[in-house]
Image (tube, rainbow, N blue to C red):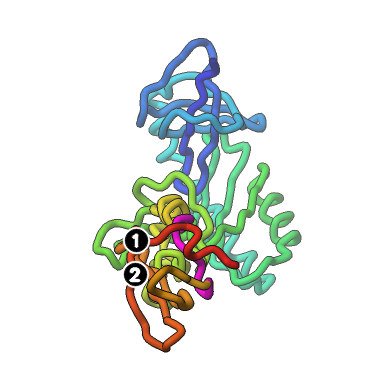
């Protein structure tokens, strides 16, 4: 079985790399990885089953780790030059960070923008200045929040910048399924998008709701006849408006499936 690890070379760049020569790195250990003909240093995050993008060559030496700091001078120079080019072409982008590969054969600029941009001229110009392969990558607002970090409305550090390994899309349906008050300001995170934690119990709610009638469905028992106007998943109850116009609260434990199936 292949030993594949998730290696973080930069907070905005993680790659799945296979360990070769029977070398098994430890979690949080710095290693030298090779992918797309370039070498870089990264921290081992965890084992993974993702498709591999590169290989782990060996454990990083102290000299190689210190090289990361030395490259920061070059990264600062690259950032200044790139910002000049952005101003020159009036590109509406906000540069978030820059990352240089260990061997300086490649450098990546990360930015956020309100829309897709054509930066081919800027790309060509910065590549000519730096004399290396250049990647200019637009990141989403969620990735930006993960990079910045912070505290969420719950009072804890942002999930995306602490333990979440994958940022998945969240829809209003996920909030409605939990009977939450759908006010975007109340259920949005620091990034302005819907809270990631709305997905934590998604599968549980999806499983529970199968036992409930749909809103608008008819209920007919020996004592009650009416229409379902609401459900309370936490209390295992439903709201029913009877044919007489009364609103009542019923436990689904007292109902049989045939009582609320559409006729």
Residue with the most extreme top position: 22
Q: Quadrant of the C terminus?
A: bottom right
Q: Position of residue 126 (x, y in %)?
A: 66, 54
Residue 93's tag is: none
Q: Position of residue 158 (x, y in %)?
A: 34, 57
Residue with the most extreme bottom position: 245
Q: Who is closer to the viewer here, 250 or 126? A: 250
Q: Position of residue 84 (x, y in %)?
A: 60, 66
Residue annotated with mark 2: 250
Mark 1 closeness class: few <14, some 14–19, many ≥20 residues within 10 Å: few
Give yes or no for residue 210 being in the magenta stretch.
yes
For image coordinates 42% across by 87% down, the residue present is 244
For image coordinates 41% across by 76% down, the residue present is 240
For image coordinates 66% across by 42% down, the residue present is 132
Q: In the rendered image, is residue 170 in sight?
A: yes
Residue annotated with mark 1: 254
- Quote the CA–CA distance across marks 1 and 2: 8 Å
Q: Quadrant of the N terminus?
A: top right
Q: In the rendered image, is residue 184 in sight?
A: no
CB under 8 Å between discs 1 and 2: yes
Mark 2 closeness class: few <14, some 14–19, many ≥20 residues within 10 Å: some
Circle 1 SS class: helix
Q: Who is closer to the viewer here, 212 or 193? A: 212
Q: Position of residue 54 (x, y in %)?
A: 60, 28
**Residue stretch in magenta:** 209-217
Asked if residue 221 is positioned above or below residue 110 in the image, the reply reads below
For image coordinates 43% across by 21% down, the residue present is 59
Asked if residue 204 is positioned above or below residue 92 in the image, the reply reads above
Residue with the most extreme left position: 155
Asked if residue 20 is positioned above or below residue 120 in the image, the reply reads above
């Amino acid at each position: 079985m292949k030993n594949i690890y998730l290696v973080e070379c930069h907070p905005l760049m993680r790659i799945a790399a296979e360990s070769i020569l029977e070398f098994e790195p430890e979690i949080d250990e710095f290693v030298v990885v090779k992918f797309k003909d370039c070498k870089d240093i990264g921290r081992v995050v965890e084992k993974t089953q993702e498709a591999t993008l590169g290989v782990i060559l060996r454990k990083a030496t102290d000299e190689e780790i210190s090289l990361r700091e030395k490259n920061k001078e070059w990264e600062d120079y690259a950032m200044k030059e790139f910002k000049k080019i952005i101003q020159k072409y009036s590109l509406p982008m906000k540069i978030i960070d820059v990352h240089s590969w260990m061997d300086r054969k490649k450098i990546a600029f990360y930015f956020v923008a309100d829309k897709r941009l054509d930066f081919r001229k800027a790309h060509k110009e910065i590549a000519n200045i730096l004399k290396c392969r250049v990647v200019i990558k637009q990141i989403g607002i969620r990735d930006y929040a993960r990079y910045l970090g912070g505290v969420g409305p719950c009072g804890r550090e942002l999930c995306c910048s602490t333990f979440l390994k994958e940022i998945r899309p969240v829809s209003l349906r996920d909030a409605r399924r939990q009977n939450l008050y759908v006010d975007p300001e109340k259920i949005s995170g620091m990034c302005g998008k819907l809270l990631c934690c709305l997905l934590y119990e998604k599968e549980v709610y999806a499983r529970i709701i199968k036992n409930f009638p749909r809103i608008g469905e008819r209920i007919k028992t020996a004592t009650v006849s009416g229409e379902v106007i609401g459900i309370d998943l936490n209390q295992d109850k439903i709201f029913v408006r009877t044919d007489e116009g009364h609103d009542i609260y019923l436990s689904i434990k007292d109902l049989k499936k045939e009582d609320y199936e559409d006729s």
